[in-house]
Each structure stands twice: as structure tokens, then as C-alpha cells.
Amino acid sequence: MAAGVRQSPIYLDYNATTPVLPEVRDALLPFLSPHFGNPSSDHPYGRAAAEAVARAREQVAALLGCAADEIVFTSGGSEADNWALVGRIWAAGVAHPHIITTVVEHPAVLNTCRFLERHGVTVTYLPVDGTGQVDPADVRRALRPETVVVSVMHANNEVGTLQPIAEIAAICREAGVPLHTDAAQSVGKVPTRVDDLGVDLLTIAGHKLYAPKGIGALYIRRGTALEPLIHGAGHEGGRRAGTENVPWIVALGAAAALAHATLEREAARQQVLRDRLHRLLVERAGDVTLNGHPTARLPNTLNVRFAGIDGNALLGAVPEVAASTGSACHAGQTEPSAVLLAMGVAPDTAIGAVRLSLGRLTTEDEIDRAAAALAAGAARLRARAGV
Ligand SMILES: Cc1ncc(COP(=O)(O)O)c(C=O)c1O
């Protein structure tokens, strides 16, 4: 797949996953073979692999503006999220540990918190406002002497809302509590320099930035105490055991380098296309409401709800477009997205939501065709329902 090639159906689900770009694939292939060595081996095969891993670590560190030894590769975003929370509990050694997080986190954080609650940890789930943002003052109020980590996502996967991480970080720093941010959706889409954000732990998921699925990283600020989650031999400086997934690590490095070199230009391009899609839908599909923050939002993400329509039914009626809704279908009943409910959207209108997320391969022609197809689909469904 290359830029400019017409895709069918039109892919507008880049927040779910991204294709592996040709330059990323070309970088990783030699590390399947001939450079198949184990980075721990003390011979030319091993050394070639170890050098490639070191280079990839530098590339990821450059994107985040941190030191290479602050990056540890993981099996993806979920492992990094699990590790940040569980690792802090074990490292803090507090009798009755407390975590602060938000109601709109990804299940990789929320379900880790629920697991920890079953094992004696207390969790505060902070609310969000109508745009999906947390109030930093709520973080300050929720802090306790036993708080061992605060975890607030950088950008929400469904609506794209960006959290005021730097403000939250200042509050956490004053209290001496490490701040973790799940940046799975923001790395590669908006600047994520760790010193600008002020975070101590940051999650990366490779498949959201044009690397393969099953690779990610956790940024760990020097001096942040964190127990390992995966025990074994001394890989990754003794912090994460398991023979390194060299080809996928190389891919993540190449994807990070690409993001680093072109982030601003690509973000601006996608934002123009995203706003064009929004405008076309408002003009042609009638009664369309934005979900999420109007400006503090990922440049590629457009989550809208269509009045009087079920988002899943709409996508079912428009096979020309591959996108998603945040709602789940259980036994023929549509369950509205928990994120939208947390933002105060009424359940009967929340089910009209559709998430359209753009990416590096999205073209203006695709946007125009997608808008036309969605508007026609909405009109058909409304006519059928007599709305
Ligand atoms: C915000 C967020 N966090 C974490 C994850 C999990 O990442 P992975 O799929 O690499 O485990 C995702 C992926 O959907 C995500 O969107």
C-alpha cells in the first residue's frame, strides 16, 4: 500500500491501528534474516542485532526528547500501561496504596486498576467535563499521602481530547508523586516531549504510529522507582526480561524517526482534511454534533454523533467507509460508549457516534468520497426510520 493508491473501503480507522509504512517494513525485514542474531550473543550476528536495538532506542528517545536509557521496549501499549501501574505499587512498598486515574482511560489502564482494587489497592477515578477533559484541581484534591502514581492519558482514543498533562504534572511534582501518561494515541500525532509534558512514565504503542502490532515502549524518567513486571534474564538493563523482538524494535525506531522528521507537517495536513470532513458532514448530513474538545484534540480525530441514527447501523449501511464507533453491540442492543456517557452525552444520542480517524495515507479525494457516502447513508437511514 502506498500513498495515493485508492483504498477500498476508505480507511478512516487509524486510531484503531495503522498500516506498516514501506520505509518501516524495509527497515525491519533484514532483522528477520540475514540479521537474525540474539542481541545478547557475543559474536557478529549478536552484535549486529544489539546495535540495531541501540539505534532504535535512540530514535524513540529522540522523538520523546529523553535519554536512550529511559526507554524500555515492551510487547505493546497494554503491557506498558500494566507495568507503569503495577510496577509503581510494588516499588512504593506502601501498606495501603492509592492510585489516581480518570474515567475515560483505555481498558489497559482501567482494567489494571480494577484488578489492583481486587487486591487491596484504592483507586480514585476522576470525572471529565463535557469535552472529555479532567480538571487539574481534581487531581490536587484527590492526592493522598499513600498515592503512588497518577495515570492520566495524553489523548483519548475515541474522541481525541488532549488532557492538560503539563498542569497535572506540576501538581504531581509538587506532591512528589510520579505521573504516568498513556500516550498510545498521541505519540507521532502531536508533540510528546517528556520534559514539556513533565511526565515520569509514558506509554507508546507501535501500531498506532505505523510500526507493527505487538511492540511498544515505556519511558521511565531516571530516578523513578519501578519494579519489573516481567521477570527473567537481564534484558533491557534488567528491567524487562525476554529476548528482544529485534525486527519489531527496529520498526518502532524507524517509525519514531519518521514521526520525528515529519510530525508538524503531517499533523497540519491531517487537521485540514479532518476539518474538511467535519464541515462536509455538517453541510450534507444534517444534525451532526462534535464529540470531544473543539481545539484541544488530536489533529486526525473526528468523533461525531448523527441525530436519530445508530452509529453501528450507519457504518453497516456505508460499506465504502471503514471506521468505528465506541459503542458495543450486545445481543442486538447497542450499548453507548462509556467515554461519551462520562462526558455527559445522553445514552440515546451517544449511540449515534462514529469515530473517523485519519492518517498518513488519507487523501482529500477519500475525504470527499467518505463524506458523500456517510451523508447518503444517514439520509437513507433517517428516511427508513421516518425521521
Ligand atoms: C489509549 C490506548 N492505550 C493503550 C492501548 C493498547 O495498546 P496495544 O494495542 O499496543 O496493547 C491502545 C490501543 O488501542 C490505546 O488506544
Image (cartoon, rainbow, N blue to C red):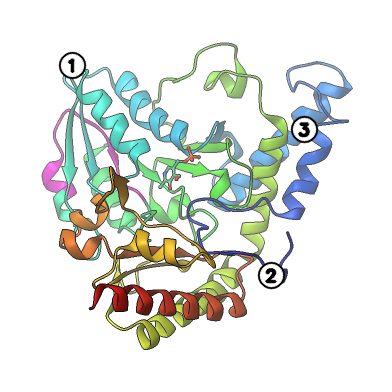
Q: Which residues are magenta?
A: 139-153
In this view, the residue in front, 366 or 150, is 366
Q: Position of residue 233 (x, y in %)?
A: 59, 11
Q: Residue furthest top?
A: 232
**First in sequence: mark 1 vs mark 3:** 3
User: Image point 41% across, 74% down: which residue?
Assistant: 377
**Which quarter of the frame holds ligand 1?**
top left
Amino acid at dot 1: Ala
**First in sequence: mark 3 vs mark 2:** 2
Asked whether residue 223 appears in the rendered view, the answer is yes
| CA gap, disc 3 and disc 2 | 38 Å
Q: Residue furthest left?
A: 141
Quarter of the picture holding the C terminus: bottom left
For this view, does 308 lie left or right of residue 69?
A: left
Q: Position of residue 338 (x, y in %)?
A: 24, 50
Residue that carries the numbered disc 3 in the rendered image: 51
In this view, the residue in front, 166 or 387, is 387
Q: Is residue 68 magenta?
A: no
User: Image point 42% across, 63% down: which residue?
Assistant: 315
**First in sequence: mark 1 vs mark 2:** 2
Q: Which disc number belongs to residue 6?
A: 2
